[in-house]
Amino acid sequence: MTPKPRPPSNGADKEDWPAVLSYWRTIAAEAFDDGRRAQVAECISRISSTSPEWQAAINGDAAVAAGLVLRLEPPPRISGGVDLVMTILLNTAFGDAGAALVLAHGLRKMPLDPRLRARLATSWLVHNVWLKHRNRRSGASNRGDQ
């Protein structure tokens, strides 16, 4: 994996590392409007990799992105790599119920303030339910049109 831009090695080059990479651990699902979603998508579009698995996740394959997160061990601290993989999953979780569920699960393993962790994880569980309901309604209306 060759991410661009590179994570900050110290505080001096922090502006090179987009704040968007912290959204998954600071912003609840319901607060992602079109503008924030676009910021996440633009950030992801700047990532490149030579790994076919990472390429698929970067290109929006929710199942592959979920697999990357499910293999993460609970980290002792949030690193640039954790931010990267969780942001890739976040990008797919906006429209994929399974990815939203894995994002909630992944959040529960992170070294965040317990109240923030619970609030964020719950928001993605609610988003998961909303997506499932929306997809069922959309499927039912498509069957009714036939």
Image (cartoon, rainbow, N blue to C red):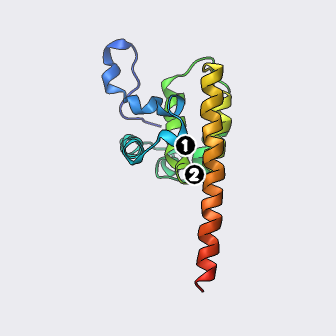
Circle 2: element type: helix
Q: Is residue 24 left or right of residue 127?
A: left
* Number of marks: 2
Residue under label 2: 62
The residue furthest top is 11
* 86, above or below 133, in the image: above
- Label 2 is placed on what type of residue? Ala
Residue under label 1: 89
Q: Is residue 2 left or right of residue 99?
A: left
* 143, above or below 25, in the image: below
Residue 129 seen anywhere in this rendered image of the structure: yes
Q: Quadrant of the C terminus?
A: bottom right
Q: Residue at x 65, y 37 (%)?
A: 122
- Residue 13 rendering spot, x and y as whole percentages: 32, 18
Crowd class of label 2 (few under 14; some 14 to 19; many from 20; radius 10 Å): many
- Residue 69 rendering spot, x and y as whole percentages: 62, 38
Q: CA distance from mark 2 to mark 1?
A: 7 Å
Circle 1: element type: helix
Residue 71 seen anywhere in this rendered image of the structure: no
Q: Residue at x 50, y 33 (%)?
A: 27
**Label 2 close to label 1 by CB (< 8 Å):** yes
Q: Residue at x 52, y 22 (%)?
A: 79
| Disc with the residue nearer the chain's start (2 vs 1) | 2
- Label 1 is placed on what type of residue? Leu
- Residue 55 rendering spot, x and y as whole percentages: 48, 48
- Residue 60 rendering spot, x and y as whole percentages: 50, 52
Crowd class of label 1 (few under 14; some 14 to 19; many from 20; radius 10 Å): many
